[in-house]
Image (spheres, rainbow, N blue to C red):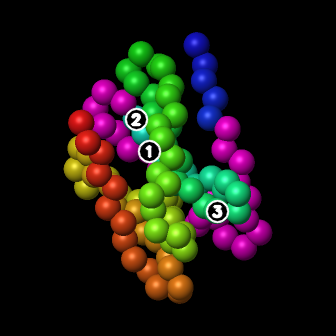
């Protein structure tokens, strides 16, 4: 069985915004990456469970506009939390993403 995640990204200046991060949650692995939709960068989330089944989780749409996430530099800090650096108006900030059970 094979599954594909279509990830179309490009940037002429830097690869900071176009990378991805894997998050291990025990029974499944989450694949986080930026995806442009309607000229807006959205943080997309796909997961693969232990049996190999892939599912697309709802796109994280309720994020404040204007933030550019850098998933390449994200760090998993617990079993269900990840810290993702981001930019807004040339300031660096950090977002905590927490998954509910």
Which secondary structure class fits the magenta region best? loop
Instruction: Identify the residue shown where x is 26% and y is 42%.
Output: 100
Q: Secondary structure at mark 1?
A: strand
Q: Secondary structure at mark 2?
A: strand
User: What distance separates the C-alpha of mark 2 from that of mark 3?
Assistant: 25 Å
Instruction: Identify the residue shown where x is 55% and y is 74%.
Output: 66
Q: Are marks 2 and 1 in contact (CB under 8 Å)?
A: yes
Segment colored magenta: 6-28
Closer to the camera in the image, 58 or 18: 58
Residue to which mark 2 is pinned = 29
User: What distance separates the C-alpha of mark 3 from that of mark 1?
Assistant: 22 Å
In the rendered view, does 41 fall on the left or right side of 48?
right
Closer to the camera in the image, 71 or 59: 59
Q: Farthest residue in the right direction?
A: 12
Q: Nearer the viewer, mark 3 or mark 1?
A: 3
Q: Position of residue 72 (x, y in %)?
A: 50, 59
Q: Farthest residue in the front direction?
A: 62
In the rendered view, does 84 fall on the left or right side of 4?
left
Instruction: Identify the residue shown where x is 62% and y is 35%.
Output: 5
Q: Quadrant of the C terminus?
A: top left
Mark linked to residue 59: none
Q: Position of residue 63 (x, y in %)?
A: 45, 62
Q: Quadrant of the N terminus?
A: top right
Give yes or no for residue 3 being in the magenta stretch: no
């Amino acid at each position: 069985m094979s599954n594909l995640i279509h990830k179309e990204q490009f940037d002429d200046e830097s690869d900071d915004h176009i990378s991805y991060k894997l998050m291990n949650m025990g029974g499944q692995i989450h694949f986080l990456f930026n995806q442009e939709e309607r000229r807006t960068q959205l943080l997309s989330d796909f997961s693969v469970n232990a049996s190999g089944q892939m599912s697309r989780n709802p796109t994280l749409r309720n994020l404040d506009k204007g933030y550019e996430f850098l998933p390449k530099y994200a760090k998993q800090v617990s079993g269900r939390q990840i810290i993702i650096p981001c930019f807004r108006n040339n300031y660096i900030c950090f977002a905590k993403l927490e998954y509910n059970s």
